[in-house]
Image (cartoon, rainbow, N blue to C red):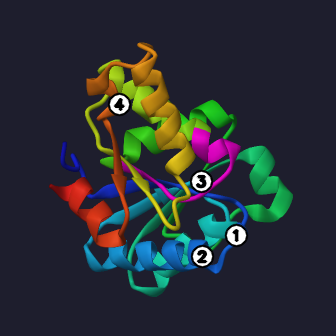
Amino acid sequence: MPLSRPRVTVYCGSRFGGRPAYKALAEGFGQALAAGGLELVYGGGAVGLMGVVADAVLEAGGRATGVIPRHLARAEIAHHGLSELFVVETMQERKTLMATLAGGFVALPGGIGTLEEVIEMLSWTQLGLHDKPVVLLDVDGYWDPLVALVDHGVREGFIAPEHAALLQRAESIGDAIALLTA
């Protein structure tokens, strides 16, 4: 499932996490998006890995579009240097607009929100609501527990193997770009 449009929605943490490798991954991925002519769509924040990936895209001459709910924008975490910033009313509007704008999805390390967003996009793929690639961009085995959980769901008969296969895993930035653009 290659990109249907040259925009990639990136889900990632509003924190930096506990390892320098996470920040380096976000920065490198942002640079790779811009170098590949791919636009970033993300949650619109200036904090954590979200801010790092957006800054890397912009510094490399790329386009970065943010989508942020008004209550978070008011908390002064909105990134005001973006190519485009949509301020929406609810988290559901945010997720829907990010999905609509995207040609594919990548999850970098993140917390509960990142998990929820990537699983929702995987669910939408399974339900036939879109056919866009969903990729986990891994570093230092961050996504191992999620992959193990999905595999457990397959073994226990709750997840069909073909649906588990919709969640693609990349262990390098180059692999993630290749999965998105194949």
Q: Is residue 112 magenta?
A: yes
Of callouts 4 and 3, which one flags the residue occurring earlier in the amino acid sequence? 3
Residue 63 seen? yes
Q: How crowded is mark 3: few (under 14 residues within 10 Å), some or many (20 or more)?
A: many
Q: How many marks?
A: 4
> Disc 3 marks which residue?
43
Three-letter code, disc 2? Lys
Left or right: where 172 falls relative to 110 = left
Q: Residue at x 53, y 67 (%)?
A: 140
Measure how far apart labels 1 and 2 are at the Cα level. 6 Å
Asked if the residue under mark 1 is in contact with the one under mark 3, i.e. CB atoms within 8 Å, the reply is no
Task: Indicate which disc residue 16 carries.
Answer: 1
Q: How crowded is mark 2: few (under 14 residues within 10 Å), some or many (20 or more)?
A: many
User: x and y percent of residue 26 in the render?
Assistant: 52, 72
Q: Give the range drawn in magenta.
A: 105-115
Measure how far apart labels 3 and 1 are at the Cα level. 15 Å
User: x and y percent of residue 79 in the render?
Assistant: 66, 68
> Disc 4 marks which residue?
164
Q: Mark 4 against mark 1, which lies toward the viewer?
A: 4
User: x and y percent of residue 69 in the render?
Assistant: 69, 45
Task: Name the one closer to the observer, 129 or 116.
Answer: 116
Of callouts 3 and 2, which one flags the residue occurring earlier in the amino acid sequence? 2
Task: Indicate which disc residue 23 carries.
Answer: 2
Asked if the residue under mark 2 is in contact with the one under mark 1, i.e. CB atoms within 8 Å, the reply is yes
